[in-house]
C-alpha cells in the first residue's frame, strides 16, 4: 500500500495538514475535478462561447454611460447572442439593449448559458448565491475582475468560470476564426 494512504477500516490521522485537506475536499480527485471548471485556455473559452446562446449580464449599464458594461454586451448581441440585462444600478430602467431588465438572475425565466459579470471583485460575493440558484453552465468575470473564492464556490458547484478576460475580445477572436 502506498505511503500516506489509509485503510478503509481505519480513520486517517488528523495532523494539521491532513485536517486541512479533509475540510477542503474529500479526496485529491475532487480537487482536480472542480479545478477543471476554472477555464484559462483558449480552447476552453472557445468551447464555452460555441455552446452559449443566452447571456445574462450582471452589472450591465445603460448606453448613456459609454462604459464597457454597456458596449461589451452590445457587441455580443450584434454577434448573435441573446442578452438578458441584470443591472445593479438604474432602478427605473425597464429595458436595456431592447431587452427587458431583471433585478436578479434567479428571476430570469428559462435557462441562461453564461453570466457575464461586471462587478468589482469585492462586490461579487454578494451575487454568488443568486448565480448558484440560476446555475448557468458558465460564469465570466470581465477583464480586470478576479475573485478566486467566488470562482472556487462556482467551480465546486459544477459551473465553469473564466476570470480576467474580456468577452468582446474573445467573441471577436472566435468570429475571426470562423
Image (cartoon, rainbow, N blue to C red):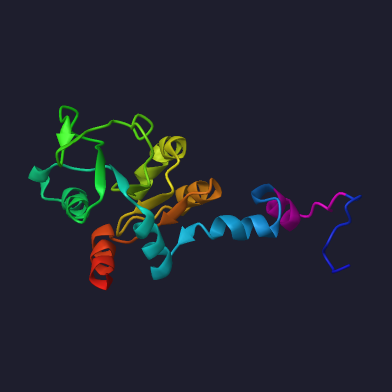
The image shows residue 165 at horizontal and vertical percentages of: 32, 61
Instruction: Compare residues 57 and 46 and report the one nearer the observer.
Output: 46
Whole-percent x, y for residue 147 in the image: 42, 52
122 or 157: which is nearer to us? 157
Query: Residue 72's image quarter?
Result: bottom left
- Residue 41 visible (yes or no): no
Question: In this image, 174 relative to 146: left or right?
Answer: left
Query: Which image quadrant for residue 17?
Result: bottom right
63 versus 167 height, above or below: above
Q: Which residues are magenta?
A: 11-22
Disc tally is: 0
Residue at figure coordinates x 72%, y 50% from the top left: 22
Whole-percent x and y of residue 167? 28, 58
Q: Is 18 displayed left or right of 79 in the figure?
A: right
* Residue at (36% x, 49% y) in the render: 121
Residue 141 x %, y %: 35, 53
Q: Quadrant of the C terminus?
A: bottom left
As drawn, the residue found furthest toward the right would be 9
Report the residue that reaches farthest toward the front: 178
Residue at the image point whose x is 17% and y is 29% from the top = 94
Residue at the left extreme, as displayed: 64
Q: Nearer the viewer, residue 25 or 161?
A: 161
Q: Taking the image as drawn, is residue 75 in sight?
A: yes
43 left or right, relative to 167 = right
Quadrant location of the N terminus in the rendered image: bottom right
Does 61 lie within the magenta span?
no
Relative vertical location of residue 86 with respect to residue 92 in this rendering, above or below: below
Relative to residue 156, is residue 129 depicted above or below? above
12 in magenta: yes
Residue at 18%, 42% in the rendered image? 61
Amino acid at each position: 500500500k502506498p505511503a500516506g494512504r489509509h485503510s478503509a477500516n481505519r480513520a486517517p490521522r488528523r495532523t494539521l495538514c491532513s485536517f486541512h485537506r479533509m475540510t477542503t475536499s474529500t479526496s485529491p480527485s475532487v480537487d482536480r475535478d472542480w479545478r477543471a471548471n476554472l477555464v484559462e485556455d483558449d480552447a476552453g473559452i472557445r468551447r464555452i462561447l460555441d455552446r452559449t446562446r443566452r447571456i445574462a449580464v450582471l452589472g450591465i449599464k445603460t448606453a448613456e454611460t459609454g462604459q464597457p458594461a454597456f458596449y461589451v454586451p452590445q457587441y455580443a448581441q450584434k454577434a448573435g447572442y441573446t442578452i438578458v440585462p441584470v443591472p445593479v444600478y438604474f432602478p427605473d430602467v425597464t429595458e436595456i439593449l431592447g431587452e427587458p431588465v431583471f433585478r436578479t438572475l434567479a428571476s430570469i425565466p428559462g435557462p441562461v448559458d453564461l453570466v457575464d459579470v461586471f462587478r468589482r471583485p469585492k462586490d461579487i460575493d454578494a451575487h454568488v448565491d443568486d448565480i448558484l440558484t440560476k446555475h448557468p453552465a458558465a460564469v465570466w468575470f470581465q477583464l480586470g475582475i478576479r475573485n478566486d473564492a467566488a470562482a472556487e464556490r462556482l467551480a465546486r458547484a459544477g459551473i465553469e468560470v473564466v476570470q480576467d478576460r474580456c468577452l468582446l475580445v474573445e467573441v471577436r477572436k472566435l468570429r475571426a476564426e470562423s
